[in-house]
Image (cartoon, grey):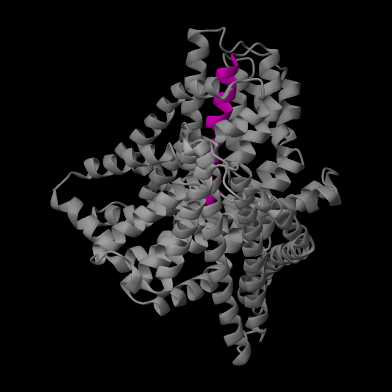
Amino acid sequence: MDNTTETAPGAEHFAGLDKIAHGLRAGLIWPNRIAMVAGGIALAVAAALIMVDVVMRNLLSVVVPGSLELTGLLTILITLAALGTVEIEGSHIKVDVLLRLVPEWMRAPTVAGGQMLAFGIVLLTAWQVLTQAAYLWRNSIVTGVLGLPEWAFVGAAAVAMLLFALALCASAILAVAESLRLAQVGTVLLLVVWIGLAAAPLGWIFRPDLFPFDLGRTGQGVLGILLCFGLIFLGVHVAVGMAAASLVGLALLISPKASLTSLQTTTISVISDETWSVVPLFVWMGLIVVAAGFARDLYHAAYRWIGHLPGGLASASTVACAGLSSIVGDTLSGVYSMGSIALPQMREYGYDMKLATASIACAATIGVMIPPSIAFIVYGMLTEVSIGKLFVAGILPGLLFTVILITLITLRAVLNPALAPRGERSTWEERGAATRSVWPVILLMALVLGGIYGGFVTPNEAAGLGVTGALLIGVITGRLTFSAVVNTIAQTLRLTAAIIVIFLFAMVFSRFIAISGLTQKLADFVLSYDLGRYQIIAAILVFYVFIGMFMNALPALILTIPIFYPVAMSAGFDPVWFGVLVVIMVELGVVTPPIGVNVFAISAVAKDVPMYDIFRGVLPFWLAYLMLVLMIVLFPAIALFLPSLM
């Protein structure tokens, strides 16, 4: 008899576990709301502070005292405020490819084990941050300019981590309850195994002598990478997978104390870095632009000019995505905005919905090339390459990709007019009126790109200017209400928390990889084969196509850059050029099965279009990505010309 169908003795006694979990989540509602309010206030203050500092410095040559250190302290509140809320809502980034393939009796205990491991890792992090806060308090350490007590802000970070840990605890209890509710012997046995597997990494952090294998430094580095990817593909939080592998690896390589100290110092240094304010500020600006309806104006203007051409409606959405990308740093905003605006019109004109949905899913990826780009920010933070140069380097590739997509759409529509019929031709008066309506986007583009390219502001200062400009324009034009602004702030905090927690533990992972010496050995190994430059870059790009099939863009970037960047630099590639290529390749993954986050997003908008059809529609657009990559490899000046002028 299959033991997976037998009833586990006593399983019914655990049916009340879910009530405990829901009670714990209910108890976290108000603390999380207070944290969100604190984060929202900090976000508004940081944007205002940056705006004032930029104006005072450029107009009056006066620097606001302590503006950088205060922005850094506020960044702690901004980046961590929504950690617990995001966990309760189930929005932290995971890769559940393997989990989808296994039966429910195996899936439930696997999820439970992953959540227990996550709870242990985050609780350990909260403890280390709290230890640092206590040290700062005992020694009365204050900031250098304003004399603010650092312990208060670090203590707030510890509280945010504790709320995250408690939310993970509730999730773990719910997963255990779900496993026991299945009342199958196989499930219970697997749950016991997973409890042991979750406890093992936590035990090795404190007692590395209990590790069952005697591995050299390189072997421990390889094992750490395998452990990291294994945990992530089993559905463990991406951030937790990196943290567990890093902490175990550092404990084995050096000592438990060094492992915990690395966690403590790296956590504080990352979340208190004022440079990270660029992420929530650019995200906020993009959400304001979408909420104010500027994205709709962009599409209508593009439609008035090219809607009458073959495939004109799809091309108009591509142009609108490119324009939206200049003020929005992520792809999903473009998918949701253009999907809700353009798809109904394309459906009305009888467009083939495979082409319609796929064109929007692919056009939205322009958002990672034309600045501001969160992907470029992450790459720059990981490699210490100038974010300003990366932003500028993405402009020409982004515009080139726009042209390639429009050309591909037009050719397909010419060859098969039934795919994408022409829209109506607009009058010159209609075109002029539509063009005038996009002045807010043009102004914001000038503030952000003009400020960075002209050297007047840093990327995070440009983000502060952009947020202030978007708010003022939205209020003056009557397109933003107070409730809409509050909603954009809350959504900004959620998106920021999901991003920052990955990067926070990625820095620990990078330190572990560096100490293991694995990257240098990998670089030496690759160079020992005397491969040509194009062979090396081709191998790296092929790997990105593969990993993009199973992982979203951001975690793929964070996981692989510490490994491949040293190899690329040893081979003599330009770091800015390599960054542009890598960002394009990880973005290819968002339209590649089986993950394809952009495909999932457009599927949520076009509910009647099967996901299989959308993926089929995307396949011809792979040609556009390949053409773009080939042109940048053969003509590096496409990415390097504008940065060379800075």
Residue depicted at 69% across the width and 56% down the height:
85
Q: Quick check: 205 left or right of 434?
A: left
Give the farthest residue toward the bottom. Answer: 139
Residue 406 is situated, as x and y percent measured from the top left of the image, at 52, 24
Q: With 235 as the anchor, is 88 left or right in this view?
A: right
Can the viewer see residue 237? no
Q: Quadrant of the C terminus?
A: bottom left
* In the foreground, 562 or 416: 562
Asked if residue 358 lies in the magenta stretch, the reply is yes
Q: x and y percent of residue 609 in the render?
A: 62, 20
Could you tell me if residue 68 is visible in this image? yes
Q: What segment carries the magenta color? A: 352-374
For the point 62% across and 14% down, the residue is: 351
Which of the 4 image quadrants contains residue 123? bottom right
What's the magenta bit mostly, secondary-structure-wise?
Answer: helix
Q: Where does the image place residue 137, in percent across and percent down from the top left?
A: 63, 88
Whole-percent x, y for residue 323 in the image: 61, 37
Report the residue at 64% width, 50% height from top: 177
Q: Quadrant of residue 166?
A: bottom right
In the depicted structure, whether residue 260 falls above or below residue 485: below
- Front-most of 63 and 313? 313
Q: Observer-nearest residue: 267 or 147?
A: 267
Reply yes or no: does residue 284 show up in magenta. no
Q: Total label count?
A: 0
Q: Is residue 355 left or right of residue 83?
A: left
